[in-house]
Image: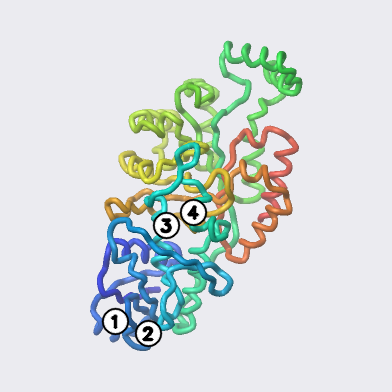
Amino acid sequence: MEILIYVPKITSRINYTFRQLCKRMLGFEINFTTKIETFIAYKGVKFSYANQRLGNEIFIQAHGLLSEQGVNDVDITVSKWRDVPYFFKTSSQSDIPYDIFAASFFLLSRYEEYLPHVKDELGEFPANESLAYKNNFLHLPVIDIWLTHFTGVLKEKFDTVQEKESQFNFNLIIAVERAFQFRKIGISRSIGGFLADVFQLKIRDLYARIKTWFKSSLDPFDVYDDLIDLKDQLNINMLFMFQLGDYSIHTKNINHRKRLYKKLIKSMGDYCEIGLLASHEGIEDIETLHKEIKRFENISNLELESILIKDRKLNFPDFYVNLEKTIIQKDYSMGYANHIGFRAGTCSSFLFYDLNLEQASPIKINPYFLSSKVLKRLNNKEVEQFINELKPYKVNLNLLFNNSDFAEEDERKRYFQIFKQMI
């Protein structure tokens, strides 16, 4: 279905925002016109986005943000409409009492992260500095919810408008920082770990280490078959992100040259999508990142598409600007490691928009909603409440875990039970 949109002037921000919301998220084909006579003569689905209404058309009053350039201080007051928070309030002329497009652009572009703010201990933008956290809507994919309101307004005027079919679902992103806890880590690390377990009286780890050495049980981090079985059982998407950095104070994985590790990466690539978990050094240095990308491609015989930063500083927007210098197309790092919720106000993928250059990038950002670090602090009832609140909106969530999160049997059972309840 096609929609004609009248705007007085087509800007880069308008083009980006309307294509993201109307085309990518709602599935509509869109065309713009700046000519009033063309808009009035059009008999199909249409609406105007301007300062003033033209006639009796559907009218969304523009706040002004999408006609600006650069980053400026923005005065924001959050209110509620239909029990959902919104900002950039408009006049009573508008068919929706706020500028859904400007508000969405503010969140998607991460406008507030360009403004002066207090950084956390990693030097990153903290959740508690965000507009969503301060106004208690971080846990809601407000952009996706706003679009249901917008679609409802269109349907009232045009009976040919149909909502895009969707259902509540989730994807698991598994970060493999350490492929194995005890296997193939080298003689010196094995002996050092064994002695540390003895002196620190870590009897459980010591027992597991010995059993792994003598191959009487699987390495505790070797949970890959269980995860693939879960994927098939629940029919969910699963993405494994493998770290391929050199050993350092930050990187404790086994050597990327190990035959066992190469076999694991290739094997997982047969069952699901695989990508790169960037090392600390790779995040800081583009040449090191290129080296890790090359390693991934040599091992997997695949062109790398996806990348993840986990428990490291997401240097926004520089990280995404640097990604444009690589072949990587998809990123899964947009989220808050220590908070549940939607950093960019949506669960849907979107293109990175560079406010410094005022242009969209080909990098597709896939935000995550919840990390295992947060889930460990929540009890099952709290998790159930969050999920039940989101289910009516038929969203698709990304959940971020480590393979090591499933090492303990009790924890593995708990997580698997939560996943099954979500379906």
Whether residues under marks 2 and 1 lie with C-beta atoms below 8 angstroms apart, the answer is yes
Left or right of 113 in this view: 311: right
As shown in the figure, which amino acid type bears the numbered disc 3? Leu
Which label was assigned to residue 108?
3
Residue under label 2: 57
Numbered disc in front, either 3 or 1: 3
Whether residues under marks 3 and 1 lie with C-beta atoms below 8 angstroms apart, the answer is no
Residue 153's x, y, as percent? 47, 79
Numbered disc in front, either 4 or 3: 4
Numbered disc in front, either 2 or 3: 3
Residues under labels 3 and 1: Cα distance? Answer: 28 Å
As shown in the figure, which amino acid type bears the numbered disc 1? Phe
Residue under label 4: 130
Numbered disc in front, either 2 or 1: 2
Quick check: can you spot residue 164?
A: no
Whether residues under marks 4 and 3 lie with C-beta atoms below 8 angstroms apart, the answer is no
What kind of colouring is applied to the model shown?
Answer: rainbow
Instruction: Please report the residue visible at 44 percent of the width from the left and 64 percent of the height from the top.
Output: 76
Q: Secondary structure at mark 1?
A: helix
Which label was assigned to residue 39?
1
* Position of the C terminus by quadrant: bottom right
Categorize mark 3 by other alpha carbons within 10 Å: few (<14), some (14-19), many (20+): many
Whether residues under marks 2 and 3 lie with C-beta atoms below 8 angstroms apart, the answer is no
Residue 323 lies, with reference to residue 198, above or below; the image says below
- 131, 379: nearer the viewer: 131
